[in-house]
Image (tube, rainbow, N blue to C red):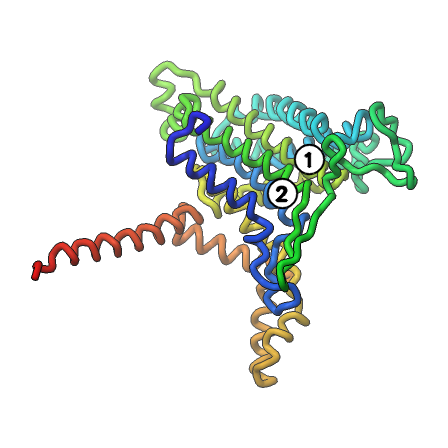
Amino acid sequence: MFGLEKKDANLLLFVAALAIFAPFILNPFPEGSAMAQFNAGYPDLMQRFAIFGIFAIGFNILFGLTGYLSFGHAAFLGVGSYAAVWMFKLLSMNVIPAIILAVIISGLFALVIGYVSLRRSGIYFSILTLAFAQMCFALAYSVLTPITGGETGLQLALDDPRILGVSQTPEGNIPVPGLFGLEMRESFEMAVGPWVFTFNIGYYFCAIIMLLSFYLAIRIFRSPFGMMLRAIKSNQQRLNYTGLNPRPYTLAAFVISGMYAGLAGGLMASMDPLAGAERMQWTASGEVVLMTILGGVGTLIGPVLGAGLLKYMENILSKINKGVLEGWFSFMPDGMSDTFVFLTNLFVGKQWHITTGVIFMLVIIFLPGGLVELGKRISGMFRKKDDDNTKSAKAEPAE
C-alpha cells in the first residue's frame, strides 16, 4: 500500500484507525459518571493530540535518525504560527495557504539556524539551538512587536486588510478559519445512551495531515536517505573516512524536521488564530523531547504515542482538584479520606508535572525504548506463553 512494506502498511492502518475512532476511544466513560473526568474526546484536546503528534514525528526524524538533540525546535513552531496568522490577516481565512506559508517560512528559518548550528555536534549543537530559540523568543516578545504583537501576541482584528474574503461576518464578528466553507470549529455530537461523542471538523483535518506526515516519515525512515542518517548516528567519524560528507544530510534532516514543526505551528493557528511568543520558549522545546523519549526514540509510532500521553496528562490530570478528590474518596472514613486526598493531590492539579517527572524517570531507567518497548515486552510475554503451551501440547504423548 502506497509503496510500503506489509509491516509499515499495517502500522499506518493502525494509526489511521486510532485517528478515525478517537472520539470513541477517548470517551470510555459515560457523561456524568465519576470517571468521566478521564474522558479526553473533546475537540480542543483531540486537535492537540494530532498537532503535537506531527511536531514529535518531525523532531524524531532529526533526533531519532541522526542523534542530534535540538533544544530549539519550538522556534519553528512559533514561526509557523506567526506566518499562518499573518496569512489570515492579509490574504484569506482558508487554512491551506496559511499552512503552506507556515511550512515554507519555518523551513527557511531551519535552513539558516541549521547551517550555523550543525557546525558543532553533541552538547554544543544542543546549546546552539537553544540559544537560537531563546533569541527568537526575545525578538518576538519585545523587539519585533509590530510583527509579532509582543506580549499580547498576534491576533486577528476587524480592520485586517484581507484580500480574499470579508474582514468580518454579517454579525460584525471576526471570521474563523475554514476549509472551503467548512469552519474548523464546527462539531457534531452523537449521543449513545449516557455517552456523548463529538466529531469536530478541525480535528479530522489535523488527523488527515498527521496521517500524511506519518506516511512521509515512514518513507524517509525506509529510504536510502534514512539509511544515511542512521549511519551518521551510528558512527559519523567512520562515515567521514569513507569520503562521504555528512553535513548536507544532517542539514536536510534539520530542515525537514523544522518544516514539520512549522506545519504543527500553522495547524495550531488554524484551530485558534492566535500566535504568541510563549510557543517559542525553551519549555516548549523540552516538551517535544519528552514526547519523543516517552514514546520511543527512533521508532515510527513512538512520538505519536508520547505526544498523546504527555498532552493527556497535561490536560486531564491538571484538572483534578481537591474537590474532585474529596468526591472520589468520600466513601472512606474521615481520617483515611483526608490522607488519601492529601497524598493524591501531590501528583495532580497544579502538581501534574511531578507525575510527568516520575513517569519520565521510570521510562529512562526501566524502559529506554519508551512505550514502544513496553508494547514489545508485553507482546513478547504473550508470545512466549503461546510458544510454551504449543511445546507442552506437542510433548504430551498421544493416547
Image location (x, y in percent) of residue 215: 50, 31
Residue 58 seen in this snapshot:
no
Q: Quadrant of the C terminus?
A: bottom left
Q: Residue at x 79, y 27 (%)?
A: 92
Q: Amino acid at mark 2?
A: Ala
Residue 306 sits above or below residue 35 on the image: above
Q: Residue at x 48, y 29 (%)?
A: 121
238 or 266: nearer the viewer: 266
331 or 190: nearer the viewer: 190
Q: Is residue 151 left or right of residue 308?
A: right
Residue receiving disc 1: 78
186 or 357: nearer the viewer: 186
The residues bearing labels 1 and 2 have C-alpha atoms spaced at a distance of 10 Å
Q: Quadrant of the N terminus?
A: top left
In terms of image quadrants, where is residue 351?
bottom right
Q: Residue at x 58, y 23 (%)?
A: 116
Residue 284's disc is 2
Residue 195 seen in this snapshot:
yes
**Helix or strand or loop: what does disc 1 sit on?**
helix
- Assess whether mark 2 and mark 1 are in contact (beta carbons under 8 angstroms): yes
Image location (x, y in percent) of residue 99: 68, 29
Near mark 2 (Cα within 10 A), the count class, few <14, some 14-19 or many ≥20, is: some
Image location (x, y in percent) of residue 270: 72, 36
